Amino acid sequence: MFPYRDDNPTHSFPFVTVILIGINVAVFFLLALGPDYEQIVQEFGFLPSEHRPITYFSSLFLHGGWGHLLFNMWYLWLFGDNLEERFGPFWFLLFYLAGGVLSMVLHGLMTPPSMDNVPAIGASGAISAVMGGYVTLFPQANVRVLWFLFYSIQTFKISALVFLGIWFFEQLFSGGLGTLAGVSTGIAYWAHIGGFVYGVVVALIVRLADPTGGRRTEY
């Protein structure tokens, strides 16, 4: 299933979401297409064996290829605007970066020793936090998805709770399987899991603190 839009309109322009997408795309064009990108990834990607502070942030803006970049940025665009409107630009940015950092922490803890020197890159952990926040604050929002079935493409609506719930359990299953087998699949499933859980927890706190969702009735 590929999500192509949600039925959850916003009333403000998502400046931070657009800026984050712009930075990721710019970094990819400026660095990833150059001859020294492997060296850059080794230097600024997150290495579980080293835990250098700068790489917790720099790794979030590096991507392994066009597909990696486009899928991440599409999910950020799809789910980020509503969360930015709910949190406000500054707190959304802080939430995003913290989610990325914590996702790398869990990835480092769960990485098999054989993969300790393999750099992890990508915004997936931070975007997983956005997805966790979204499903907590907007569980009944409809997500429109494409379903590729044999030689046809079907479209249908599904609630965010179901769509993102399925996605999360896929990550949990794949991450758990890799950990039990002591191997890495090349995908940082535990970063996705850590980011998503962090997003759910923060969004629950926000929802409990402000159950009206920022809406007010004035007299």
Image: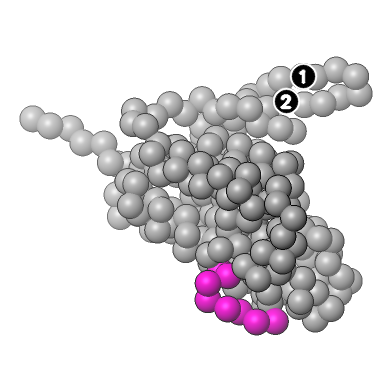
Residue 120 can be seen, yes or no: no
205 to 141, vertically: above or below: below
Q: Earlier in the sequence, mark 1 or mark 2?
A: 2
Determine crowd level at label 2: few under 14, some 14-19, many 20+ residues with C-alpha closer than 10 A. some
Please, which residue is most extreme toward the right here?
Answer: 150
Q: Which residue is mark 1?
A: 154
| Magenta region | 49-56
Image quadrant in which the C terminus is located: top left
Is residue 87 something one can see in this rendering? yes
**Would you identify the image quadrant in which residue 72 lies?**
top right
Q: Is residue 139 above or below residue 168?
A: above
At a point 30% along the width and 55% down the height, the residue shown is 209
Give the CA separation, mark 1 to mark 2. 6 Å
Q: Give the amino acid type for the residue marked by disc 1 in the picture.
A: Gln
Q: Is residue 154 left or right of residue 81?
A: right
Which residue occupies the foreground of this view, 74 or 219? 74
Give the left or right position of residue 49, taking residue 9 as reference: right
Is label 1 in a helix, a strand or a loop? strand
